[in-house]
Image (tube, rainbow, N blue to C red):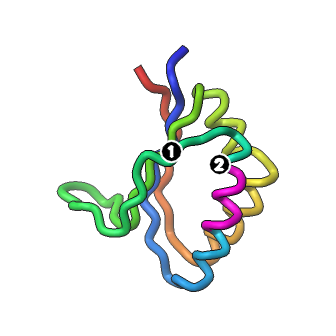
């Protein structure tokens, strides 16, 4: 079964408050056995509008990635993130 991935670019406006999001989202990621493959605050941005912190998280399947995103734990984290940043985020299925 192909793995699922969350790919995001996050433009943080309040770095101190972002620490709360990191704690909440980290717990949610662990709950769904996600693995952070990339977390880079200043990627080498070449094209498009998806600037900001780059993050890539791997899950056992696309369904697990969806369940993570729709979970109560991540919904709580997302509410914090939405107040302090602008985000481009997609869920994709691997090959």
Residue 43 vs residue 91, the one in the foreground: 43
Using the image, determine if residue 54 lies above or below residue 11: above
State the residue position of label 1: 57
Q: Secondary structure at mark 2?
A: helix
Report the residue that reaches farthest toward the top: 1
The magenta segment: 22-28
| Percent x, y of residue 95 | 40, 19
| Percent x, y of residue 39 | 42, 58
- As measured in the structure, the alpha-carbon distance from the residue carrying label 1 to the one carrying label 2 is 8 Å
State the residue position of label 2: 29
Q: Residue at x 46, y 56 (%)?
A: 88
Q: Disc 1 vs disc 2: Cβ atoms closer than 8 Å? A: yes
Q: Which mark is residue 21?
A: none
| Percent x, y of residue 82 | 62, 69
Question: Magenta includes 75?
Answer: no
The quadrant in which the N terminus is found is top right
Q: Residues within 10 Å of mark 1 (few under 14, many from 20)?
A: some
Q: Residue at x 60, y 76 (%)?
A: 19
């Amino acid at each position: 079964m192909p793995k699922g991935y969350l790919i995001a670019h996050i433009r943080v406006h309040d770095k101190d408050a972002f620490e709360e999001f990191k704690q909440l989202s980290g717990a949610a990621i662990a709950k769904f056995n996600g693995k952070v493959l990339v977390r880079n605050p200043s990627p080498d941005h070449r094209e498009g509008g998806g600037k900001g912190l780059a993050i890539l998280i791997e899950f056992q399947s696309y369904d697990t990635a969806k369940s993570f995103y729709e979970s109560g734990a991540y919904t709580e984290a997302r509410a914090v993130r939405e107040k302090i940043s602008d985000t481009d985020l997609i869920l994709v299925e691997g090959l």
